[in-house]
């Protein structure tokens, strides 16, 4: 398994509260990503990072922010959680060394917003 | 990006080879074929990828036809732990961070 740890693995939170999900990698890869997976939508890219303090928006970034202060950690924050953000969130990393390097995924965080 | 077509489901006896097909007839010259699988409640797991030559690693083999319009993922000795949804994805390498997972093939390995 790629050295990716997501925490927490499960979380239940109330509408309107802020939530932070953490992705930690031990591979020293520069590229990191946050996806959400929902039935009927597959995997959708939320935000990504090409290095420390270098982040950008994906296709479903509204309501989310990210931070990358260290190579190994990529944080996803739901500023004010809504029920539509109930989902499974996956972090992924990619080696920048080869242009065709694949993504490697963590085991996800299941978030329920009540 | 090229669209892929996979059968929705397949069965395979434990210990036998599982051959999972994928059609990608609109693939362009610089697009790679990537295979992932997702076991229930886990993250997608990378299996293998290739451009035009056949590839093999510790998990599987990837056979790409000469015209590159289709490919087959081979799990040489399927085990019960190989039961998962398998996704074939065709992407330009620079866009591998924007993977589009379709519906895939649900492989059921039975004893």
Image (cartoon, rainbow, N blue to C red):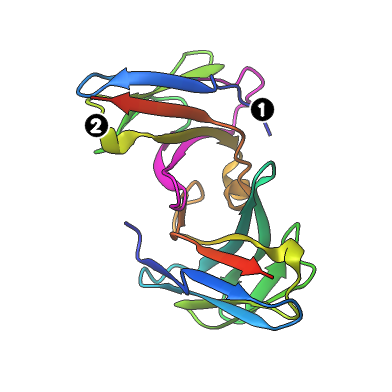
Measuring from the top left, give residue B12's x and y in whole percent: 32, 19
Have a look at marks 2 and 1 and say if they share a chain: yes
Residue bearing the label numbered 2 = B79
Above or below, A104 against B3 in this view is below
Measuring from the top left, give residue B36's x and y in whole percent: 45, 40
Task: Indicate yes or no whether the magenta region holds residue A63.
Answer: no
Q: Residues within 10 Å of mark 2 (few under 14, many from 20)?
A: some
Task: Indicate yes or no whether the magenta region holds residue B42.
Answer: yes
Residue in the picture at 38% in, 27% down: B108
Q: Quarter-wise, where is residue B75 in the image?
A: top left
State which quarter of the image contains the N terminus of chain B. Answer: top right
- Of the numbered discs 2 and 1, the one sitting upstream in the chain is 1
Judging from the image, mark 2 belongs to the subunit labelled B
Distance from label 2 to label 1 (Cα)? 29 Å
Q: On the rendered structure, is B55 left or right of A113?
A: left
Q: On the rendered structure, is B58 left or right of A57?
A: left
Q: On the rendered structure, is B58 left or right of A64?
A: left
State which quarter of the image contains the C terminus of chain B. Answer: top left
Above or below, A89 against B78 in this view is below
Judging from the image, mark 1 belongs to the subunit labelled B
Measuring from the top left, give residue A86's x and y in whole percent: 67, 63
Determine if residue A96 is in view: no
Q: In the image as oriented, which residue stretches furthest toward the front?
A: A114
Helix, strand or loop at label 2? It is: loop
Q: Residues within 10 Å of mark 1 (few under 14, many from 20)?
A: some
Q: Which residues are magenta?
A: B22-49
Marker count (numbered)? 2
Residue toward you, A81 or B34 = A81
Residue in the picture at 47% in, 48% down: B44
Residue bearing the label numbered 1 = B3
């Amino acid at each position: 398994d790629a050295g990716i740890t997501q925490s927490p693995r499960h979380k239940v939170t109330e509408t309107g509260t802020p939530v932070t999900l953490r992705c930690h990698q031990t591979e020293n890869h520069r590229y990191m990503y946050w996806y959400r997976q929902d039935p009927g939508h597959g995997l959708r890219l939320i935000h990504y990072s090409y290095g420390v303090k270098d982040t950008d928006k994906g296709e479903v970034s509204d309501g989310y922010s990210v931070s990358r202060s260290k190579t190994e950690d990529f944080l996803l924050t739901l500023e004010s959680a809504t029920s539509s953000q109930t989902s499974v969130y996956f972090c992924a990393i990619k080696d920048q060394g080869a242009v065709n390097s694949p993504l490697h995924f963590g085991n996800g965080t299941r978030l329920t917003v009540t | 990006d090229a669209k892929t077509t996979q059968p929705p489901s397949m069965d395979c006896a434990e210990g036998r080879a599982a051959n999972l097909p994928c059609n990608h007839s609109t693939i362009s010259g610089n697009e790679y074929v990537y295979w992932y699988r997702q076991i229930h409640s886990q993250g997608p797991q990378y299996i293998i990828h290739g451009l035009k030559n056949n590839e093999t690693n510790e998990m599987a083999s990837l056979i790409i036809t000469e015209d590159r319009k289709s490919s087959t993922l081979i799990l040489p000795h399927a085990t019960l732990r190989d039961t998962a949804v398998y996704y074939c994805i065709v992407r330009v390498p620079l866009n591998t961070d924007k993977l589009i997972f379709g519906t895939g093939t649900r492989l059921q390995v039975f004893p």
